[in-house]
Amino acid sequence: MSLDSRLPDFRKLEPSQRLEHIAAKAQLTAEERKLLAESGALSLQTADGMIENVIAKFELPYAIAGYFQINGKDALVPMVVEEPSVVAAASYMAKLARENGGFQTSSSGPLMRAQVQVMNLSDPYGARLAILQHRQEIIDIANSRDRVLIGLGGGCQDIEVHVFPETARGPMVVAHLIVDVRDAMGANTVNTMAEAVAGRIEQITGGRVRLRILSNLADLRLARARVQLSASSLRSKDYTGQEVIDGIVDAYTFAAVDPYRAATHNKGIMNGIDPVIVATGNDWRAVEAGAHAYACRQGRYTSLSTWEIAANGDLVGTLEMPMPVGLVGGATKTHPLARLSLKIMGVSTARELAEIAVAVGLAQNMAALRALSTEGIQRGHMALHARNIAMAAGAKGADVDWVVREMVAAKDVRVDLALQLMQARRAGKS
């Protein structure tokens, strides 16, 4: 049965009704529904085994973004995030994209880098060639540490050697092991390989190996997304489609030339990506680090995405960035909800997960640019944020909706106003 990711009027349902709806669409078992319905999916015992000094667990909202269609295939996207408007914005942009054929994605192979730093060298260029001369021997040593990975078609494939002839600590040579990690994120694998080859590299070069560690700039492990939307699909009651397109491209151009704007622009992209990474138990910090380093690859910090106008007047958005994610190992295998997230998404490879994540990032970016270049970011965001404000002021049940309506009508969303409204409502009820 093919999945339908459309979720009409989903926000109007109660959380339990939403769960039943998603459970039916994703064909979840009764036990899987229970994991989502009840707190404590992650037991304290499991949490204690994941990190050190555990005393409790910390929960975040777990939501589903709908309407995503990627390479012609529908996907429901779990997102774990605390910020209002993120899930709604991504879903709405996915709905608009769906009307225009959805997102088109692709990705490169799952290649990660392990770095081996060599110091105390008087002949760094000679050391580089010596390492390359022993390339196959070093690769074989690296691959001897993970026969399972080799059996799956992965493993160390190549070596790069970078020379830094003048540093504050003298000449430095850094050997990169290029490793196909298959469906793993790969940190443990490449770190183990780097440590395995360190001794032999010292013998070859006569130098002293210091760091042996992966690089989070996974520039050989890229995921890409593209979307194309007509002007007619972007028009609103206040703006023509052409005005929206021009506004989005102008906003993108600002981020392309100004690093102060680019930082916030790219944060908006990560607003979509990070919740997917967290929901699947992947390392969102590694993804963030790689993304922002990649944004500087041309010598200055700039936009990760591009927005252009096609010859026929359509809006075309693209996003290409490192996406080191995995389906095996770490919290992805340990956390019950991480495994369930992968089932809901229907992914079977790390590349599929990477492509979904980058599509969500592009959708979130489009939502932010569309809002910024038209009515302003606060109108929609603050309307959704108003619920948090109302609850912070002590509103419960029906009072929450009443306070939200009053603040949104006044176009003034503040805790002190919410407190005033609650006091007046209580006085009226007494």
Image (tube, rainbow, N blue to C red):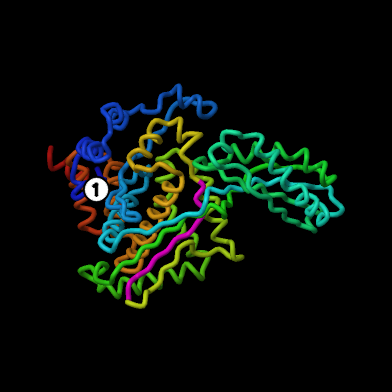
* Spot occupied by residue 277 in the image (x, y as percentages of width and height): 44, 44
- Which one is nearer the viewer's eye here, 381 or 389? 381
Can residue 378 be found in the magenta stretch? no
Q: Which residues are magenta?
A: 313-324
Pick the front one: 78 or 219: 219
Direction from residue 231 to residue 135 in the image, left or right:
right
* Prevailing secondary structure class for the magenta stretch in the rendered image: strand
Whether residue 318 is in magenta: the answer is yes
Farthest residue, direction top: 45
Instruction: Say what secondary structure mark 1 lies in.
Output: loop
User: Can residue 138 be seen from the camera position used here?
Assistant: yes
**Quadrant where the C terminus is found in the figure:** top left
Foreground pick, 361 / 192: 192
**Relative height, residue 146 to residue 156 (above, below):** above
Nearer to the camera, 279 or 29: 29
Q: Say how many tags the image has.
A: 1
> As drawn, is 14 to the left or to the right of 330?
left
Q: Quadrant of the N terminus?
A: top left
